[in-house]
């Protein structure tokens, strides 16, 4: 075998078309501004609750977009609805509404 100095890795590409998007569709129907998120992380950097836990709205939106529902089940209920992220978001995402509908999606997961 010829040694090139590197090796090929298993394909880790995420096929978005195969993701379970039921939670994203539910949230989008109730708060369309979730689609404006550009994952900048400004909301997470000043989050009140993040000082005591791993809450990150940026990460939760990514998880919802990937269909990784279980990732947000515990975190989403740690939000204090203080609104700091709402004022900070450069894209005008209605962050508190997004989190509220994330919570509703988790509560009603079997009905989505
Ligand atoms: S509303 Fe929730 S996510 Fe936003 S800064 Fe406050 S605690 Fe963090
Ligand atoms: S600040 Fe706004 S655009 Fe940036 S990650 Fe948070 S929700 Fe998305």
Image (tube, rainbow, N blue to C red):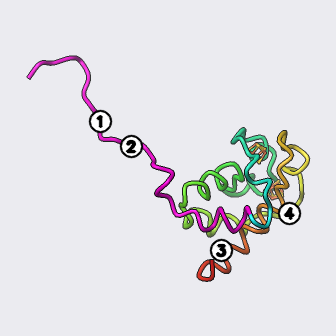
Specify the label residue 9 is tagged with. Answer: 1
Q: Is residue 16 magenta?
A: yes
Sequence-first disc among 3 and 4: 4
State which quadrant residue 99 falls in: bottom right
Real-space Cα separation, disc 4 to disc 1, in angstroms: 42 Å
Picture quarter with ligand 2: top right
| Residue to which mark 2 is pinned | 12
* SS type, badge 1: loop
Q: Residue at x 23, y 18 (%)?
A: 5
Question: Is the residue marked by circle 2 packed among few (<14), some (14-19), or many (20+) residues within 10 Å?
Answer: few
Element marked by disc 4: loop
Which residue is at a point 79% across and 46% down the rendered structure image?
43
Residue named by callout 4: 81
Q: Which residue is mark 3?
A: 106
Rounded to the nearest whole Å, what is the CA distance between mark 1 and mark 3?
35 Å
- N-term-proximal mark, 4 vs 2: 2
Label 3 – label 2 distance at C-alpha: 27 Å
């Amino acid at each position: 075998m010829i040694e090139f100095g590197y090796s090929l890795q298993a394909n880790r590409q995420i096929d978005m078309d195969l993701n379970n998007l039921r939670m994203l569709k539910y949230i989008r129907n109730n708060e369309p501004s979730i689609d404006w998120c550009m994952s900048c992380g400004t909301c997470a950097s000043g989050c009140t609750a993040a000082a005591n836990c791993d809450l990150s709205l940026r990460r939760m939106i990514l998880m919802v977009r990937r269909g990784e529902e279980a990732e947000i089940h515990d975190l989403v209920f740690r939000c204090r609805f203080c609104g700091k992220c709402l004022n900070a978001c450069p894209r005008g995402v209605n962050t508190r509404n997004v989190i509220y509908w994330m919570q509703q999606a988790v509560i009603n997961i079997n009905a989505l």
